[in-house]
Image: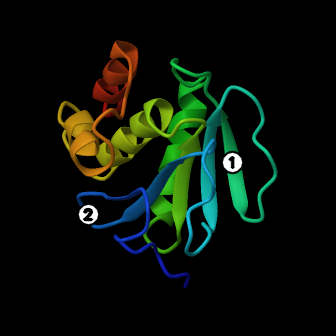
């Protein structure tokens, strides 16, 4: 069993159940501390190679995932693995797409869909989830 993140690690969000997931911006250096064991990268183009297991979700900047089915599958996998592994989700800046994905993970974790964006803004970054359509995506993620 792999150790999960510590709440003192940079960008780590504690979901309502206690699961920990790190959000980050790939444009910034890798935070100090342990590396993830699994990651979902939310980018419009294929991400760079990393030393840990990762998945790519095609998600252009300021938009929504190219495939809702793939988004639900990959975020579901990230949520399940966060119970026992160090999981991160990341986009280029670490706010819009990452915040949206973290809010969707909060919904998977049991947070009410209409409260998930506020939860992520309080506990991860105040400007997480940048566009009205990203907010709407989170609200309908629980459907």
Q: Which residue is mark 1?
A: 55
Query: Residue beneath label 2, please?
Result: 17
Q: Nearer the viewer, residue 65 or 140?
A: 65
Q: Residue at x 33, y 14 (%)?
A: 132
Mark 2 and mark 1 in contact (Cβ < 8 Å)?
no
Q: Where is residue 73 drawn, in percent x and y?
A: 55, 42
User: In the picture provided, is 60 more to the left or to the right than 10?
Assistant: right
Q: CA distance from mark 1 to mark 2?
A: 24 Å
Residue at point 21% right, 45% down?
122
The quadrant where residue 134 appears? top left
- Residue 77 visible? The answer is no
| Residue, far right | 49
Where in the figure is residue 28, as x and y percent of width and height? Answer: 60, 47
- Are there few (<14), some (14-19), or many (20+) residues within 10 Å of tag 1? some
Q: Quadrant of residue 77?
A: bottom right
Quadrant into which the C terminus falls: top left
User: Does dot 1 land on a helix, a strand or a loop?
Assistant: strand
The residue drawn where x is 43% and y is 68% is 9
Residue in the foreground of this view, choosing between 140 and 13: 13
Residue 48 position within the rendered picture, expressed as x and y whole percent measured from the top left: 79, 45
Quadrant of the image containing the N terminus: bottom right
């Amino acid at each position: 069993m792999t150790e999960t993140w510590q709440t003192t690690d940079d960008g780590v969000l504690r979901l309502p159940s206690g699961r920990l997931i790190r959000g980050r911006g790939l444009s910034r250096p890798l935070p100090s501390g342990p590396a993830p064991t699994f990651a979902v990268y939310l980018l419009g183009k294929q991400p760079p190679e990393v030393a840990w297991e990762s998945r790519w979700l095609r998600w252009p900047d300021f938009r929504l995932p190219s495939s809702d089915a793939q988004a639900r599958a990959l975020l579901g996998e990230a949520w399940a693995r966060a119970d026992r592994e160090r999981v991160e989700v990341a986009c280029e800046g670490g706010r819009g797409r990452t915040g949206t994905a973290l809010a969707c993970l909060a919904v998977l974790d049991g947070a009410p869909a209409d409260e998930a964006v506020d939860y992520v803004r309080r506990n991860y970054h105040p400007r997480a989830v940048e566009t009205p359509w990203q907010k709407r995506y989170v609200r309908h993620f629980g459907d």
